[in-house]
Image (cartoon, grey):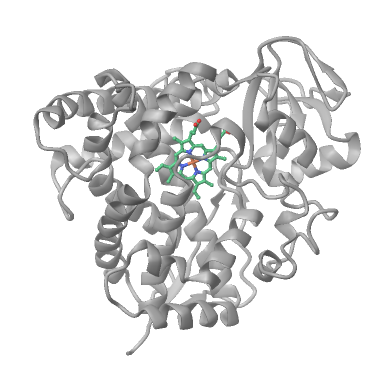
Amino acid sequence: MGDFGLPVLGHMIEQFRSGPDFARALYNERGPVSWYGSPYMKAVAVLGPDGTQEVFTNKSKDFSQQGWVPVVGAFFNRGLMLLDFQEHHQHRLIMQQAFTRTRLAGYVEHIDTVATDVVGQWPTHNSRFLLHPAVKELTLDIASVVFMGNPPGADSAQLTKVNQAFVDTVQAPGAVIRFPLPPFKWWRGVKGRKLLEEYFTPRIQGARRQEPSTDMLSVLCNAATDEGDAFTDKDIVNHMIFLMMAAHDTSASTMTTMAYHLAAQPHWQQRARDESARLGDGPLDIEALEKLETLELVMNESLRLVSPLPLAVRSTVRDTDILGHYVPKDTTIVVWPSMNHRLPELWTSPDEFDPERFAEPRCEHKRHRYAFSPFGGGAHKCIGMMFGQLEIKTVLHRLLRRYRLELTRPDYQPHWEYSGMPLPLDGMPITLRPITP
Ligand code: HEM
C-alpha cells in the first residue's frame, strides 16, 4: 500500500514540514508498513514499535546500513554507521575503547572546562540572543578540544577553516540539489569533506608518534582489541569525520529543545536548578552528573518530543517480510522511532511536555521495548549515547547555575524544520537573566 505523492517531489514537503507528524498520518491512514515517494527515493515506511524492533534487532540480517548511502554516504563514507555485519562488528569493538567509563570521565573534564568558559560569555538581557546557533558553536568548541585535542580556546585561521568545512559537511546531506554544483550545499559538503581528510591525515601520523593523550583522536590511534585489531590511518579519518558529525547536531538540537521547555515551564526549570545548586560550581564528574535526575527526565522528554534523528534508513539485502508484508531485495526502509514517541497507545497525552512520565511509577517508556528509542537499537545503537548525555547535562547544568531562561514572549511556540535533523526555524530566541549568587 502507498503512493508516490506529488510528481517529482513525492511527499518531501510534508516530510520536511512535519517530520514525525507526517509519519503519524501515514500510520493512521495505512498502518505500520506502507511505501511513499521523495525526489531521491521510494521508501517503505516501517512505523510503530513492533516494526522498529524487527528492523533494529535485524535477527535475519536482512537489513543493511547501505540505505543511508544516498542520504549521507558522499560525506560520511565508511563511518561506523555505514558499515555492515562482521566488518561493522570488528570496527565497533575497536571504537568501543574510546567510550569506556574511564575515557568518558576524561572527556567530561574537558567538556566542562569549555562549557563553563563559553556559557559564561553569552550575552544577558538580550531578547535577540539565539540559543541554537550559540550551542552549535559551543559544541564545535567542545569537539575541537575533546575530539581533535586542541588546547581550550585555541583559535587560528586553520581551525576556522576546519570548522567551516565541518559545518558544510554536516549540512550537505540536507541539500535539495544532490550533486556537486557550485556554490550549492552538496558541492560545499564535498569540498568540506576533502579539507577535513587533508586536516586529519597528517595529525594522525603525528598522534601515532606521540605519547597517547586523552582526546578521541589519540585514543582511536592507540585503540586495539585483545586480538590486536586496530584501525588504519584511513579508518581513523573516516571515523573521526563521522563521529564529529554524529555528536554535533544531535547534542545541539537536544540542548536547544531542553532550554526551550525549561524556559516555557519555570517550575521544571526551578526543580532542575535546585538539583544543580546541590552540586554547586566545583568541577563536574560522571558521578555528579548522574545525580541530576530532573535534568535526566527533562532530557528524555525533550528527546521524545524532538528526536534529533527522527528516522533511520536501511536497505534490504534479500527478499524479506516485515510484519507479514512482502518487501523485495534492494528496497529502502525508513524506520521512524520519533513517530513511536508520539503514539497515544504508548504515551499519555503524547503531544504534551510531561517529564514525569519517565519516572516511577508511570515509566511509560517501558510499555514496549521500542516505545522510546531516540538512540536507535540493535547492533547500531548509538555508541556515543553516554557521551552525548554527559555533554548535554554538563552544558545545561552550567547554564542553569548562571542564568534564568526566559521565553521572549509568553505565547512563543517554536517551529521545527525536518529537512535534516530537526532545527528551530528562528534559531530559538531565549533571554538569559543572570542569577546573582
Ligand atoms: C542526543 C545525542 C544523540 C542522539 C539522539 C543520537 C542518535 C543516534 C541514533 C538514532 C543512531 C542509530 C542510527 C541507525 O540506527 O542507523 C546513532 C548512531 C551513532 N551515533 Fe549517535 N546520537 C547522539 C549522540 C552521539 C554522540 C555524542 C556520538 C559520538 C561521540 C555519537 C556517535 C554515533 C555513532 C558512531 C553511531 C553509529 C553506531 C553504529 O553504527 O554502530 N552519537 N546515534
Q: Is residue 412 left or right of residue 199?
A: right
Q: Residue 409's image quarter? A: bottom right
Residue found 33% across the figure and 27% down from its top? 226
Foreground residue, 26 or 226?
226
- 384 w.r.t. 397: above or below: above
Residue found 40% across the figure and 82% down from its top? 277
Residue found 29% across the figure and 52% down from its top? 107
Residue 243 seen from this side: yes
Residue sitting farthest toward the left: 210
Number of labels in the image equals 0
The picture places residue 279, in percent across and down from the top left corner, at: 37, 78
Q: Is residue 155 left or right of residue 261?
A: left
- 162 w.r.t. 2: above or below: below
The picture places residue 171, in percent across and down from the top left corner, at: 44, 36
The picture places residue 330, in percent across and down from the top left corner, at: 68, 11
Q: What quarter of the picture does the C terminus occupy? A: bottom left
- 277 w.r.t. 205: above or below: below
Q: What quarter of the picture does the N terminus occupy? A: top right
Foreground residue, 283 or 412?
283
The picture places residue 267, in percent across and down from the top left corner, at: 59, 82
Q: Is residue 353 left or right of residue 167?
A: right
Residue 403 seen from this side: no
Foreground residue, 369 or 170?
369
Residue sitting farthest toward the front: 226
- 43 w.r.t. 128: above or below: above
